Amino acid sequence: MLRRTGTRLRVENTLMIAPLLDIMFLVLLFFILNTSSGSVESFDVDIPQASQGENRQPPNHIVVLIRANDEGFVLNEVEVNEAEFPARLQALMRELGTSQILLLASQEADYGRVMRSMDMMKRAGASSVSLGVERLEEADGQL
């Protein structure tokens, strides 16, 4: 900023804070809108363990459970056979207004069956299918 003092022009260095605050609020807003939190309910399934896992679940969530020795699915705590699974999933997605699915599959479940179920979910209109894992605790209790 130029300022006249007598007969000389003097340059005054100032730091404009308002634009910096605007940028910081935009960054904060970006992170708030792109994160979600929640907890996963407990089911009777032996899911795989991983050292890196997130605890995320959408508020209107759809949980699909695949057991090791069972031919059907559990869709939000309701037993569903494989033939009626796509139609029931589509109806539940319309009812809850979400197309995000959390898939909990037993680690002993057939890999091909898990992949076929993910394909059925995508064909039913699921926008994203997240795989659930159990966090692996290390010997000293820290992750």
Image (spheres, rainbow, N blue to C red):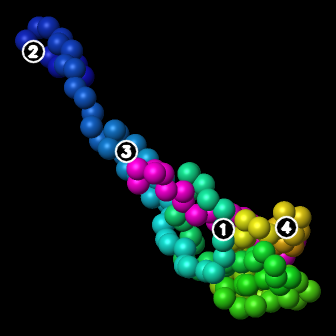
In the picture of the structure, the residue carrying the numbered disc 2 is 5
Whether pointer 1 and pointer 2 mark residues with C-beta atoms closer than 8 Å, the reply is no
121 up-or-down from 5: above or below: below
Q: Are marks 4 and 2 in contact (CB under 8 Å)?
A: no
The amino acid sitting under disc 2 is: Thr
**Looking at the image, can residue 11 be seen?**
yes
Highlighted magenta segment, given as a residue range = 123-143
Going by the numbered disc 4, the residue's amino acid type is Asp
Q: Residues within 10 Å of mark 4 (few under 14, many from 20)?
A: some
For residue 142, say whether it is visible. Answer: no
List the residue tagged with mark 4: 110
Residue shown at 40% from the left, 43% from the top: 23
Q: Check the image and name the residue furthest to the top.
A: 8
Front residue of 80 and 138: 138
Of label 2 and label 3, which has the lower sequence position? 2
User: What's the magenta bit mostly, secondary-structure-wise?
Assistant: loop
Q: Give residue 24's mark.
A: 3
Closer to the chain start, of discs 4 and 2, is 2
**Circle 1 is placed at which residue position?**
47
